[in-house]
Each structure stands twice: as C-alpha cells, then as structure tokens.
Image (cartoon, helix red, strand yellow):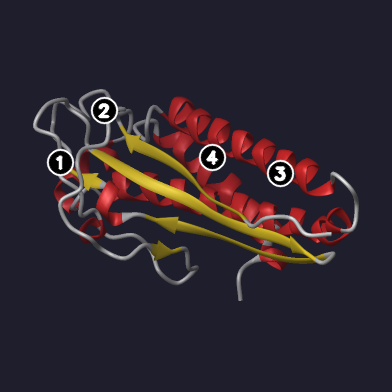
Amino acid sequence: MKAPLCAVAIALAVCGAARPRAQNQTIDVPLIEWSEGRKLAVADFKGKTPSRGNGASLSSVLIEVAWECREGQATSHARAVFDPNGSWWRDPSPNLWQNANDASLLASRDEGGRALLEHEQLHFDMTEVWARRIRDAFKTLPAACRTSGGPRGFEKVITDIERQWQEEQQRYDRETGNGTDASRQRAWMQKVAKALRETYATAAR
C-alpha cells in the first residue's frame, strides 16, 4: 500500500503579556531546534517589533511533522523549533509590568527581561513536550501503514495532538497572566519540567 507523504509545520505564535499579530519578517535566520542545553536569548528574537501595541514579545514556535507510508513501511519525523524571523522582542516597560505581583519580576526589567524570557522559553519547552508525544504516537504508524484507511486515521491522531498543544499553550498564558503571576509561572515551570522528564524516552537523539 502506498500513501502520499504527509508533511506539515504545526505553527503557533505565542507572546508574553499581550497578543498582537505577528509582523512582517525582515531577515532570514535559520530555525532553532529545541535542545536541553540551548536556551533562548533575547538576540534570538529577530522579527520586526510592531510600532503599535504594548506587547513585550512574541514567540513563533512550531512542531515540524513529516510521515509517510510506502509499501507498508513507515517513516516519520517530528521536531520542535523556534522561528527567530517570526519572533520579536521589546524591552519590558514599567506600564506593562506595573501589575506584576512579585518584586523579582519588576527587577527583571533591568536584567534584559529575565522573567519574560523564562516565560517565552517555557512556551518552547512545552512545544518540545508535544513533539515528543507525536514521536510516541509514531509508534503506531507502522501498523497504520499496513491497514486500509490507516494513514487517514493516523492523520486525525496528529490533528488531535496539535489541538491539545495549542490549548495548553493558551491556558499557560491565561493562567500565568502572560508570565506576570510569579507563583503560577513557577508552578507551570515545575509542571513542564516534570513532563520533559516523563517524555525523555522520545527525545530526539
């Protein structure tokens, strides 16, 4: 049985402290693949900062997914990436953080937006968790490739994972006040760290 290649970049733009639309990209910088030892830096946000709005930053994170059934055999690939071209950064302003409930968040304005950067990093970390869950789902792909209609059903599995990933990203921003609620931000950091440990078996090697 031969099925066409299914390749898709599941994209999501998420931001700290606001949700303005992504702006036109001005330069072409390679995607950054998630790595445990490589954290995001302010310099990674290469996109054009919007002139209007009070948003502090926007992260463009993606899950690149490709899989294929050919002659009953399966090949697959999934990875979490950060798109510097679609991501922008504006230094946090006093007005933006005036309702922050923790002095360390306010102090972070003088540290290059450390708290905001940690918030954006967690968006990326969460994307890696869901990329690993897609890799785990790929374990069922060989059987699907040998079944009539299996590839179509498998595509629905990937779509469902995409929906859950986006819902969790939005819930994270909502519950943490886009990173300005320090206690909830810490709780989410612990939650995502636990998820990364639990999904380590499907981490890219």
Q: Mark 1 or mark 4: which comes first in sequence? A: 1
Residue, x 78% and y 49% (percent of image)?
A: 151
Local secondary structure at mark 2: loop
The kind of residue tagged 4 is: Ala
Q: Which mark is residue 49?
A: 1
The residues bearing labels 3 and 2 have C-alpha atoms spaced at a distance of 31 Å
Q: Which mark is residue 155?
A: 3
Q: Name the side, left or right, on which 131 lies relative to 89.
A: right
Neighbour class for label 2 at 10 Å: few (<14), some, many (≥20)? some
Q: Quadrant of residue 96?
A: top left
Residue, x 13% and y 31% (percent of image)?
A: 94
Front of the two marks 4 and 2: 2
**Quadrant in which the N terminus is drawn:** bottom right
The residues bearing labels 4 and 3 have C-alpha atoms spaced at a distance of 33 Å
Q: Which mark is residue 20?
A: 2
Residue 12 position, x and y percent, is: 44, 40
Task: Say if 140 sits above or below 103 in the image.
Answer: below
Neighbour class for label 4 at 10 Å: few (<14), some, many (≥20)? few
The residues bearing labels 1 and 4 have C-alpha atoms spaced at a distance of 30 Å
Q: Mark 4 or mark 2: which comes first in sequence? A: 2
Q: Name the side, left or right, on which 154 lies relative to 159.
A: right
Q: Mark 1 or mark 3: which comes first in sequence? A: 1
Q: Residue furthest front?
A: 2
Residue, x 85% and y 64% (percent of image)?
A: 72
Task: Say if 135 sits above or below 150 in the image.
Answer: below
Local secondary structure at mark 4: helix
Asked whether 176 or 61 is in front, the reply is 61
CB under 8 Å between callouts 4 and 3? Answer: no
